[in-house]
Every structure is written in C-alpha cells, then in structure tokens.
Image: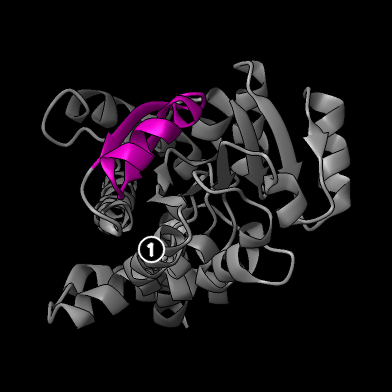
Amino acid sequence: MKVAFLGLGVMGFPMAGHLSRAGHEVCVYNRSPAKMDLWRETYDGRSANTPAEASSNADVVALCVGNDNDVREVICGDKGILEGVAEGTVIVDHTTASAELARELEDLCSSRGLGFVDAPVSGGQAGAEGGVLTVMAGGTAASFEKALPVMESYAKCVRLLGDSGAGQLAKMVNQICIAGVVEGLSEALLFSERAGLDTAAVVEVISQGAAQSWQMQNRYETMLEGQYEHGFAVDWMRKDLSIVLAESHRLGLELPVTELVDGFYADVQAMGGSRWDTSSLLARLVDRHAESKNEADG
C-alpha cells in the first residue's frame, strides 16, 4: 500500500520503519527535517516538505504527534493532510488525544469522502521499536479494515472497539490502570527495601501470583537502581491523565486514585523528572522519605 506517516518521534520513527520493512511504499513527514533525513538513511522510503505533499496519492495516512492541537494542525491546517488526500483515503491517528477530537475529525473526514480511525497505541518506545504495539481503534468497520494491514506492520494486537472515539476512550482506561499499578509497585518496592527483605527474591515469588504485572516484570530492577530512562516520559503521562480526568469530569465520575497519582507525577516534574519514565514514582517516594528523615534528624 501507499502509506504516509507523519510524526517521527520516539514512536513514529520506528513505526514508519516497520511499514517500509513490511513492503509498503512509505512517504514520511516531520517538522524537523533532520529526523526525515535520518529516517531516509535508515529505511527505504521518501520524505515530503508538508503533510499535504506526503499525503497525496496515499491509500492510508498515519500520524503520531503530540496533542489535540497538533493533530488539528497536521490534518486541518495550512498545507495539512486534507489539502493533499484523495477521496477514499483513510486517516489513522495514533496520537493519544481526546475522544471529542476523534468524533470531530470523523465527521469532517466523512463529509469529504475520507475514512478516519482513532487508534492510540500502548507499548511505549520498546513496543514501537519491536513492532509489538497494542492498537485500540475506533471508527467504521470499512475504514478499520482498509487500515488494518498498515497497523499490523508495527503491532501485535489491533482491535476495533467501537465507533469513533472508542479507541481514545480505551487508551484512557489503559492509562488509569497503569497509573495505579506503577504507584502500587513503587510503594511495594520501597516497603520491601525498608523492611530489610531481599526484594529481588520477594518479587520473584509474588510475580508468580496475583501481584504480577508487566510493570513488575519489566521495571522493578531498574526502579531499584534508580534508572528512569525507559521511554514514556512523565510529561507525556500527565498529558494523557489530563485527558482522562477531563473525560471523567464530563461523565460525572470521580477517579480518586488517578487524580492522586497525577499529583504525584506533578511532584516528579518539580523534582526535575519531566523526562524520566513513568516508573519514577519510586523516586518521589524515596525523596519524600529522605526529607522526612532529615526533618526528624534535624
């Protein structure tokens, strides 16, 4: 298929690479030309100077950018996707954005004879590089089926979960779960260390039971070593959680744990950890307990 991929960040760069390796005819666009140059040196494909140029003649246009405003600009802005695509093209948005935006863009695309799929991903940088992302999609069955071979190039699981906006809502569910799990794991590791246990042995045992999680299996060692350079940054998590909390307020729901953990990530930002990965909640706990000890000693 002829595919345009817009946004060559830590996720988009390898995702577009998997498309090329899968045999698709790929044209990329990124606001920073240096990223496009590097991508062309690494993979087989072309680059374009504008989203409109990249999207011309594409069967599917995929994008992975920052937030709602970035998505609107890339799709609807001057020399955006809508100025370049032909009728019948499907636009796939892998950005974690609002469900409201997804519905808005579905209506706009439908009125122009285009397909639209909101398709946020989970799996982080490692998942993108390994081609094993999980894609949560919303949209029509026809648009989803046309875009499926593209998404399968970089994902291990791709699922249509409902109409437009369903993908974004599912990603919100994902982030709610992650927020609670990471905080729970952080507290457990700190407790184990302060109680004088062999934490590695404890984790080996409890990971065989109900406490097991992806975070435990993949992050506990680096958390104990104070290494927080594993992709999905605190800044990005707070952006995602702001979307979650806005949607929960719209639905009239209280999410006390999610709100609490969002505040904890704000503390991590204040510590200078904006670019640390989400497992850095442990750093916050260690820092808070160190402060308390200093105050007690003082």
Q: Secondary structure at mark 1?
A: helix
- Nearest the viewer among 106 and 271 is 106
Q: Is residue 91 above or below residue 221?
A: below
Q: Residue at x 31, y 51 (%)?
A: 167
Q: Which residue is mark 1?
A: 102
**Within-10-Å neighbours for mark 1: few <14, some 14–19, many 20+:** many
- In the picture, which quadrant includes the N terminus? top right
Q: Residue at x 40, y 47 (%)?
A: 119
Res 183 → quadrant: bottom left
Q: Is residue 1 left or right of residue 175?
A: right
Residue 50 percent across, percent down from the top left: 78, 56
Q: Is residue 231 left or right of residue 170?
A: right
Q: What amino acid does circle 1 point to?
A: Ala
Q: Is residue 22 above or below residue 56?
A: above
Q: Does residue 107 show up magenta in the picture?
A: no
Res 79 → quadrant: bottom right
Residue 197 percent across, percent down from the top left: 28, 37
For the record, the magenta segment spans: 134-160
Task: Using the rendered image of the protein, determine whether residue 112 is visible from the camera's viewpoint.
Answer: yes
- Nearest the viewer among 265 and 290 is 265
Q: Is residue 251 above or below residue 238?
A: below
Q: Is residue 60 left or right of residue 248?
A: right
